[in-house]
Image: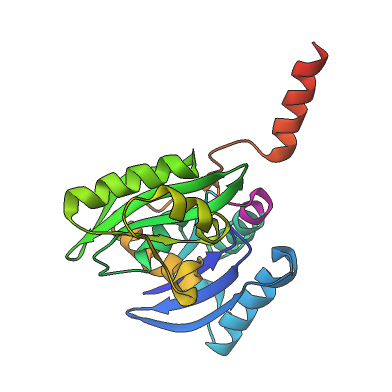
Amino acid sequence: MKILGIESAAMTASAALLKDDAIVCEYTTNFKKTHSQTLLPMIRSVMEITETAAKDVDVFAVSEGPGSFTGLRIGAATVKGLAYAADKPVVGVPTLAAMAYACHGSQYVLCPMMDARRTEVYTALYRFDGEAFICLKESCCLPVREIVAEAEACAAETGSRVLYLGDGADVYKEVILSTAAAAPVFAPAHMKSPRASAVAEYGRVLFEQGKAVSAFEFEPVYLKKSQAEQEREAAGLATE
């Protein structure tokens, strides 16, 4: 089975090809370029270097959000076009779940965080029980201190600690340190950012669970309104 994974929910842009049990190619960048500049060239390079045509891909797995509104829209438009042209299914992979799944086998409670601004983060809680990947809290948007408290409570129940990952953990590291009663653990650089390889790998799990949809059916998950929408609503309320 061949799965093309696409990640564009945050600053990281990434594309990877999973063939059976191996990641045969992955391109990732986390720099000051827009996804409209980087994503398609990355996908094209992955396909060319592995001599893979779109019709040879069995499933397209894409990070569905939450995350950057612009990034998610670019990723969605890209995968819809590819999957429609190739007449292949799409698996929407929760961004936070893919980040946590990359820590396969970890003994920690996993708390991925993506900066949602105003001291809030897109977050969720997961843990592994052997091979089982367990969701303790679904994707949501919460104040940092609130999710830290919930994460610590989950860790206390299992006698473990909390591993924080994602750009939100970097941005709010001091808040986490000042809030957490137990010593928090912060993921190293190679584990903290979303990666297309994890999207592809967890996408396979979701595909085997029957969670694929058509290109027409796939939609990204935003969780909350964009900053522009919030500002328009605020302006409208102010003028009433």
Looking at the image, residue 93 lies above or below residue 54: above
Residue 83, placed above or below residue 145: below
Q: Which residues are magenta?
A: 67-73
Frontmost residue, 80 versus 159: 159
Residue 210 at least partly seen: no
Quadrant including the N terminus: bottom left
Could you tell whether 143 is left or right of 101 in the image? right
Q: Is residue 135 left or right of residue 129?
A: right
Q: How is the image coloured?
A: rainbow
Magenta-colored stretch includes residue 166 = no
Where residue 168 appears, as percent x and y from the top left, is 53, 55
| Farthest-out residue, top | 240
Residue occupying the point 45% across, 74% down: 188
Count of numbered badges drawn on the protein = 0
- Of helix, strand and loop, which mostly describes the magenta segment? helix
Q: From this viewpoint, which residue is outermost toward the right?
A: 239
Residue pictured at 46% horizontal, 58% vertical = 89
Residue at image x 28%, y 59%? 161
Pick whichever, 36 or 68, lies toward us.
Answer: 68
Depth check: 34 or 230 in front?
230
* Residue 81 x %, y %: 63, 59
Choose between 52 and 154: the one closer to the eye: 154
Q: Quadrant of the C terminus?
A: top right
The residue sitting at 42% across, 39% down in the picture is 146
Q: Quadrant of residue 207?
A: bottom left
Q: Quadrant of residue 183?
A: bottom left
* Residue 70 covered by magenta stretch: yes
| Rendered location of residue 215, percent (x, y) | 53, 53
Above/below status of 234 relative to 193 = above
**Residue 240 can be seen, yes or no:** yes
